[in-house]
Amino acid sequence: MNPLKWKLHWQILAALVLSLMATVVIKSTGGADAALGANVLGACSFLGKLFMNALKMIIVPLVASSIIAAMAGLTGGRDFRRMGFKTLAYYVCSGAVAVTIGLLLVNVIAPGTVDPEVAARMEANANAANAGEIISAKVEGKSAQDIWDVFLRMFPANIIENASNNGKLLGLITFSVLFGYFISRLDEKWRSTQVNFWEGASQVMIGVTELILKFAPIGVFALVTPRLVELGMDLIEPLSKFTLTVLLGLLLHIAALCGVLAFFKVNPWTHLKAMSDPLLTAFSTASSAGTLPLTMETVEKGAKVSPRTASFTLPLGATVNMDGTALYECVVVIFVTQVIAVIDPSFDPLTLSQQIMVVFLALTTSIGVAGVPSASIVAIFLIMGVLGVPTEYIGLIWVVDRALDMCRTAVNVFSDTCAAVIIAKTEGEPIYED
Ligand code: ASP
């Protein structure tokens, strides 16, 4: 029973259980400020950063080499157009289902229609957590105009500069797709050299990914423990209805995606089980970009999706397909307006047409949200600005944002993996038991 020989998901689950136990011990021995708490959390902060840095280090070379290798191997422009069309159709439809679920739940449950006393506690918790300052620093310099910047980001003026930023994967993807596509059209003598080189490079990156993932359980423990320690019941309680609304929405969306998998004759349970490593890692890191190396490895090795399909759908998915995020944005914006109406009776709740605008904006902005922790706060800020909702109230949800970020990121990644297997299936690839 050597734990080092366990499968990765069991090791990660064990790390999560240990993290929970460590939290109980830290809390019962004086909390984060006491000697034990401070030492453990200090070590966690160092190790967590080390693990995240290692994951982020390989994103750019992995994405570039795998997309170029996959595109270079396409047999013609038709392949590319067909895959591109299917991928985008999936992303738009799954995002639309997610925001619709969010919109319905937040209206039916109305988590923001609370007693004035509960609303006051939410405000007090947000102030105690310095939510206002933290969020202002995040959204500094952003304006409604930034919503459309996502299209500009597809064509960066300088690809070297662009590739030096993990938060700007979209430009790198466009460049790599073009680069690989034009390799596929070269004369054979040049084409084969290029294809061999990029396939080799992408295999090297897979090797580095596997090495880093051996440390995932330590990274997960180090990333999750500080989050659990800072999460107090007194903070969650006034936001419990809101938290449950988001969680219910995410669960319903997972159920909807499982239904789509079943429709395409992929066993949802087999898929969920096979994807447990990236899902647990997404949950622990709250970063779909950071999880991307593992997502690609698992979809290719576990679900047997071809490198061609995985390399095309997954990096793009980690950047633009954020179902959990879109659902969350929609619920937060409407929830905040419900609470404002309690605090300030002169504030008019959103009309139906304004809510439809929220749906549209949540879908569009989720495309531009970077796959890093709490990235959707910026999008929520922009949406509230467009609708004329006072943006200072965004701090109301801050105390539970990180916990919900872990959950929505897992849903973001799950949806990406569903896209990969569904597209592979429709391309006639022998995935899973086939
Ligand atoms: N953390 C999310 C992700 O990486 C983005 C967000 O919703 O903040 O997918």
Image (spheres, rainbow, N blue to C red):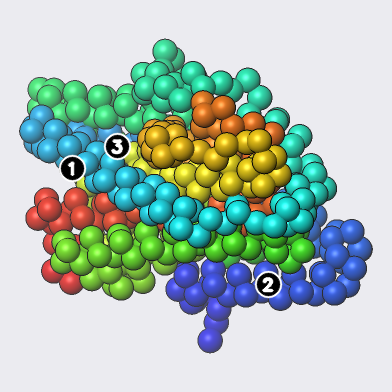
- Image position, residue 356 (x, y; %): 39, 38
- Image position, residue 409 (x, y; %): 48, 52
Q: Mark 1 highlights which residue? A: 86
- Image position, residue 160 (x, y; %): 45, 20
Name the kind of residue labelled 1 in the image.
Answer: Lys
- Could you say which disc has been placed on residue 20 in the image? 2
Secondary structure under tag 1 reads helix
Secondary structure under tag 3 reads helix
Of pointers 2 and 3, the one earlier in the residue sequence = 2
Which residue is located at x 74 percent, y 37 percent?
132
Q: Quadrant of residue 36?
A: bottom right
Estimate the spatial distance between the alpha carbons at disc 3 and disc 1, rounded to whole Å. 17 Å
- The residue carrying pointer 2 sits among few (fewer than 14), some (14 to 19) or many (20 or more) residues within 10 Å by Cα, namely some
Name the kind of residue labelled 2 in the image.
Answer: Leu
Secondary structure under tag 2 reads helix
Residue 268 visible in the shown view:
yes
Which residue is located at x 44 percent, y 34 percent?
354
Q: Nearer the viewer, residue 273 or 62?
A: 273
The C terminus - image quarter: bottom left
Tag in front: 2 or 3: 2
Q: Nearer the viewer, residue 307 or 337?
A: 337
- Image position, residue 28 (x, y; %): 85, 74
- Under 8 Å from ligand 1: the CB of mark 3? no
Estimate the spatial distance between the alpha carbons at disc 2 and disc 1, rounded to whole Å. 41 Å
Name the kind of residue labelled 3 in the image.
Answer: Ile
